[in-house]
Image (cartoon, rainbow, N blue to C red):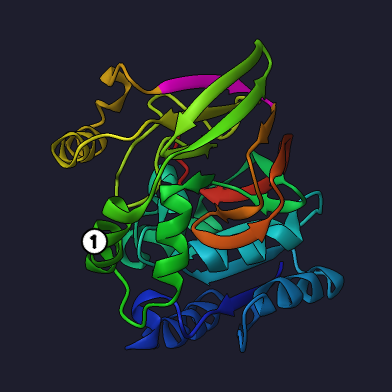
Amino acid sequence: MKARFIFNPHSGSNRRNPYLRDRAAAFIQERGLDATVVDTERPRHATELARQAVADGCGLVVAIGGDGTMNEVATALVDTPAVFGLIPCGSGNGLGRFLGIRKPGHGAFRTLLDGRPMPIDTGLVNGFPFFNAMGLGFEADIAVRFSRQTRRGLLGYIRVGLPSFFAHRPETITLTHPGGTAELSAFTLAVMNSDQYGNDARVARGAQLDDGQFEVISMPQVSFLGGCGMIYRLGTDTFDRVKIVARFKGAAFTIERAKPGWIHTDGEPRATTAKLEIKLKPKSLRIMVPAIAG
């Protein structure tokens, strides 16, 4: 099988120590693969490289990077014969953690050949693909601030999250969902495909990547102490017990807000219109997962 490894030298630990490029080259040699490693050079370049890989007949296209790199590579593989491989080395690694591919050293390379391809649902919001989560409000503001940081990791999220928490204000939105419409005062709103943002912060307990539906989570503004309680719930997989959070399930949603603004798709900020059209594409991407994954 022909394969292409797409390495982002600016993702997570890659910017400090690009050893994973060498690890990928060694893996290719050890397994006797017909494969090459290519580097991204600019934002969105990974999508171009992945599309070229599909055009070149690659049956496996691997992203070596964080959630942004994952999104860019996977975008090019939706509705194609190619299988997506993931070597997660970013700040959150939400999709990888959900699938049991937590870090490069946790069997990620072995999974590429010894695992199994799993068809998963994918999402579109105003034409922007997402695979793990998208959102607006507070979490989009964090994505914007985080994208401007040179130092990443969990501490980076805390560094930008605290000032954003105190500065951000909720917005009134109208959510059209399969059961009707709802008027919400959303401090932050997430559309989840998996159960977590990343860093094991689980916001949608029970969510699955292949169940044909998203889970929308809308949280109102809370006090600082209330926010600390929310963080505790995220880290202990008990967020479903928070009563003030509104939850909706479905395969298609429309969100209308007062004005255009920021959203994020898998942690990457996007500027878009006031009206958001969110749609699910069932089982439109195949990804290699550990053989024992449920």
Figure quadrant of residue 219 = top left
Residue drawn at x 67%, y 47% as measured from the top left: 286
User: Where in the figure is residue 117, as x and y percent of width and height?
Assistant: 61, 46
- Please say whether residue 248 is one of the residues in the magenta stretch: yes
Does residue 120 lie above or below 73 as drawn? Answer: above
Does residue 273 lie above or below 253 as drawn? Answer: below
Q: Nearer the viewer, residue 145 or 178?
A: 145
Does residue 67 lie above or below 118 as drawn? Answer: below
Residue drawn at x 55%, y 68% as measured from the top left: 69
Quadrant where the N terminus lies? bottom right
Identified by mark 1, the residue type is Ile
User: Chief secondary structure of the magenta span?
Assistant: strand
- Please say whether residue 55 is one of the residues in the magenta stretch: no
Q: Is residue 292 left or right of residue 51?
A: left
Residue 33: tell me if it is visible. no
Q: Which residues are magenta?
A: 246-251
As drawn, the residue found furthest toward the left would be 225
Q: Nearer the viewer, residue 32 or 199?
A: 199
Q: Nearer the viewer, residue 10 or 29?
A: 10
**Mark 1 lies on residue:** 158
Does residue 112 lie above or below 35 as drawn? Answer: above
Q: Is residue 106 left or right of residue 77?
A: left
Tally of numbered discs = 1
Residue drawn at x 66%, y 34% as measured from the top left: 255
Q: Is residue 153 left or right of residue 67?
A: left
User: Where in the figure is residue 283, as x and y percent of width and height?
Assistant: 70, 36
User: Where in the figure is residue 91, as x and y percent of width and height?
Assistant: 35, 65
User: Where in the figure is residue 99, as x and y percent of width and height?
Assistant: 44, 44
Dot 1: element: helix
Residue 50: tell me if it is visible. yes
